[in-house]
Image (cartoon, rainbow, N blue to C red):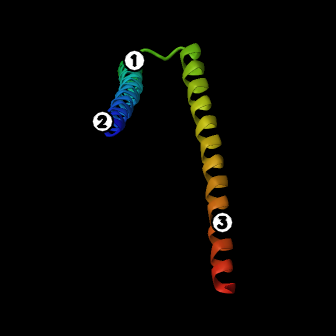
Amino acid sequence: ATEAESRMEQVQKLRAHIYHSDRELERTCMQNEDKMHGFVRLLARKRDEIKFLDDRLNMLAAQHERLLTSREPVSESALEVAMLEKDKKMSAMDEHNRAQARVLQQVRNDVRSCLDFMIRT
């Protein structure tokens, strides 16, 4: 009877282990499904954002084309708005370029330090 009880205990332990493993697997699957749905929602938002920006670009391109082809003089306010937009874009691009230059300089310094260390050792 002792051997049978021992085997029954082993079977119960294995069943408990299987049960807990199944629960852990289900929990992991649910977490992965939640992450996947989050990524799907993020992708949908990014698609909407891209569509909005694409529509805006097309609208601005059409306005620009109308300004270029119009025979009427362009109003000063329209020119000012266009110049302000261009100014903002140029400022943003300049800042981006400065940031990229800083990162590039940091990378150069890191590479130089690594090379110096490799040469010394």
**First-in-chain label (1 vs 3):** 1
SS class of the residue under badge 3?
helix
Q: Quadrant of residue 107?
A: bottom right
Q: Quadrant of residue 14?
A: top left
Residue depth check, mark 1 versus mark 3: number of the one nearer the observer? 3
Badge 1 local density, few (<14 within 10 Å), some, or many (20+)?
few
Residue depth check, mark 2 versus mark 1: number of the one nearer the observer? 2
User: Between residues 10 and 104, which one lies in front from this camera angle?
Assistant: 10
User: Between residues 51 and 44, which one lies in front from this camera angle?
Assistant: 44
Residue picked out by circle 2: 4
Question: How far apart are labels 2 and 3 at the CA level?
Answer: 68 Å
**First-in-chain label (2 vs 1):** 2
Q: Position of residue 106 (x, y in %)?
A: 67, 59
Question: How far apart are labels 1 and 3 at the CA level?
Answer: 40 Å
Question: How far apart are labels 2 and 1 at the CA level?
Answer: 71 Å
Residue depth check, mark 2 versus mark 3: number of the one nearer the observer? 2
Mark 1 in CB contact with mark 3 (< 8 angstroms): no
Residue picked out by circle 3: 110
Q: Residue at x 47, y 16 (%)?
A: 73
Residue picked out by circle 1: 52
**What's the amino acid at mark 2?**
Ala
**First-in-chain label (2 vs 3):** 2
Q: Quadrant of residue 56?
A: top left
Q: Residue at x 30, y 35 (%)?
A: 4
SS class of the residue under badge 1?
helix
